[in-house]
Image: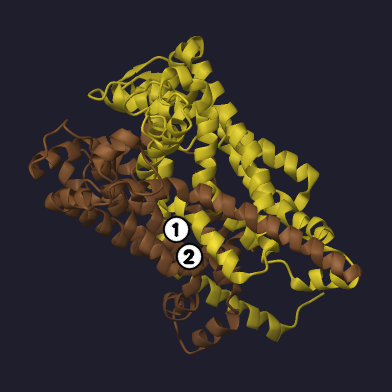
Amino acid sequence: MKKNRKIGRSLVFNVFNVLWMTLFAIYCLIPIVIMLSASFSKDEALQQYGYSIVARGFNFQAYSVVFMNVIPLLRAYGVSFVVTGGGTLLNVFLTAMIAYPLSKPHFRYKSHITVLLLITMLFSPGMVPTYILITQYLKWKNTFAVMIIPQIGTTFYIILLRTFFKEIPAEIGESAKIDGCSAFREFLTINLPLSLPALATCSILVALGYWNDWGTAYLYVDDNRMWNVQMLMINLVQEVELWKKNFGLLAGTASSDSVVMATCVLGTLPILGVFMALQKYIVSGMTVGAVKG
Amino acid sequence: MPKDKAEKRERKKKFNLYRKDDVSYLAMSFPVILKTLVFSILPLLWLLMAFESYKGFLGIFGSKWVGFENFAYFFRSKVIWHVIWNTISLNLLFIAVGTPLTAVMALFMFELKNRFATKLFQTIYFIPYLISWTVASYCIEGVLGTNGLINTMFRGMHIPAVDFYNTANGKMWPWILLLCNIWKGQGYSVIMYYASLSGIDTVLFEAAELDGANRFQKMWHISVPHLRKIMAILLIMSMGGIFRSDFGLFWFIPKNDSARALLDTTEVLDTYIYQLAIRETDYSSGTAIGLVQSIVGTVVLLGANFVVKKLDKDAAFI
């Protein structure tokens, strides 16, 4: 009797729990569903009836407008792929390279480096001094360097990887060292392969940062041949007007909403794919950083 | 107590081995250290601009020194106080609503013992986090715009359309920004809290069960105390960022980059500095406000850390 009541209460809780989590899931998905449905809708229908969950007058015209004018999109993809791919590899490797010594209790300069990293976390020089440094002294406008290098070595990822390296038993490295293995080789051949899950977590988050980095491009890229995907998004409305003209649609006769949304979908797909492929590492990796960090 | 000679020698050998490693370790840390010095320490030099009437062609050492004139000019102006108020009040709103909501959602998600369901919800909640603010601004316009989803629904119910992007509706925007912020960031924070919860030793739950604790007692006495540390750390961090904001949210979502109709309720220090320094090239004033921003941030962070340390020694950040 008592047990039945307990199960009953538990059931009520579970139903309530799933219900409100589903509601929040719907809340998360609505703007994305809107984007998808609008990209498949007829522009006239969007103007007349407004956006809706289900596409009105389902068609692929918006996507054909984009594919007829695919050069700007391809170029933006190219820049974003180079920055995201190359940047993530370099970034995660260098982050691991500094996280590893910091995980060693007997490293003499450990505290010095930690203090330096802490200072940069506590006090940032602000947007303008960095802007002056990059534009007037380094002269890095419109370069890949500016899109990649300033994001390297984020303290959060250093801590995440350091925590993971600490978990690896020191005996493994020590036995290699007796056989004459250098510290760097020990890191490269033993510790890196053992930390693949943590590296994967880091890589997803870093890659996401690079792919969605509109801020750097907004400040330092004014040449539209060096636009990344996000810069294209920022200037999308003007771009789409051009594309429609090329497609033979008169500017101003219909709105460009569906084409804008179609480009948004195409701009988000790559990072969504990477996330779906590697998502199992996100929760597991964050556990490492969150619990003991 | 004198040490054994053999042991001493052994130690010295190990010590030498460590010193040899130190060189490799330094070399390995070098790239990130160099990057940090160039991009976080070197720019501190240009903070001098805050005390000058900086002209690009005269350079940092040639420009005229004006002392605290830039700061004084700002704190006399009315706009800045308004912008500071927006920044602080919106940040506090985000923290006050976001932190408890995240904790509750993570606790409930942790109670969901079905692995498939947990994974599904985590994936869905994380998707908005993957979308950049630039794309999000079009999505959100699809909901709020004159043809947006809400107005489509209003039309169905014969309610007159609402132009959310009109200055007249500025009062709604703190709440709209709160909803956008939750939409985009909630998934990430919930997963972070959830990850922390899944680090709890299951023995604790089993022991509590044996003692006859029910679900809510377990939640209240085991899970909640476990979340305290991560909550404290995130709270300290967000207090440190009280003068800063998520630039993309405040720049693109209320269209402060183009229409600028909602400045009254949505302009924050970061967007103000961008407009002033980069668009209007008033570098000196931009640096001055940025400096105030950094100093206040550091002081508040250290203060919050101090308070947390007093309350619970383990939960502090530094």
Q: Provide residue B212's location: percent of width, then percent of height.
A: 90, 68
Say which residue label 2 marks.
A201
Specify the quadrant of the image occupied by residue B140. Answer: top left
Q: Provide residue A171's location: percent of width, then percent of height.
A: 59, 83
| Residue A52 vs residue A34, the one in the foreground | A52
Q: Provide residue A267's location: percent of width, then percent of height.
A: 29, 52
Q: Is residue A153 above or below residue A249?
A: below
Badge 1, how many Cα within 10 Å: few under 14, some, many 20+?
Answer: some
| Residue B13 vs residue A80, the one in the foreground | A80
Identify by letter the chain in brown. Answer: A
Chain letter for mark 1: A
Q: Residue at x 46, y 86 (%)?
A: A180
Q: Is residue B288 above or below residue A135?
A: above
Q: Is residue B43 above or below residue A204?
A: above
Q: Is residue A181 visible?
A: yes
Q: Provide residue B57's location: percent of width, then percent of height.
A: 22, 24
Colour seen for chain B = yellow
Q: Residue at x 25, y 44 (%)?
A: A42
Is B77 left, or right, of A244 in this rendering? right
Q: Residue at x 43, y 21 (%)?
A: B263
Say which residue label 1 marks.
A205
Q: Is residue B299 visible?
A: no
Specify the quadrant of the image occupied by residue A95. Answer: bottom left
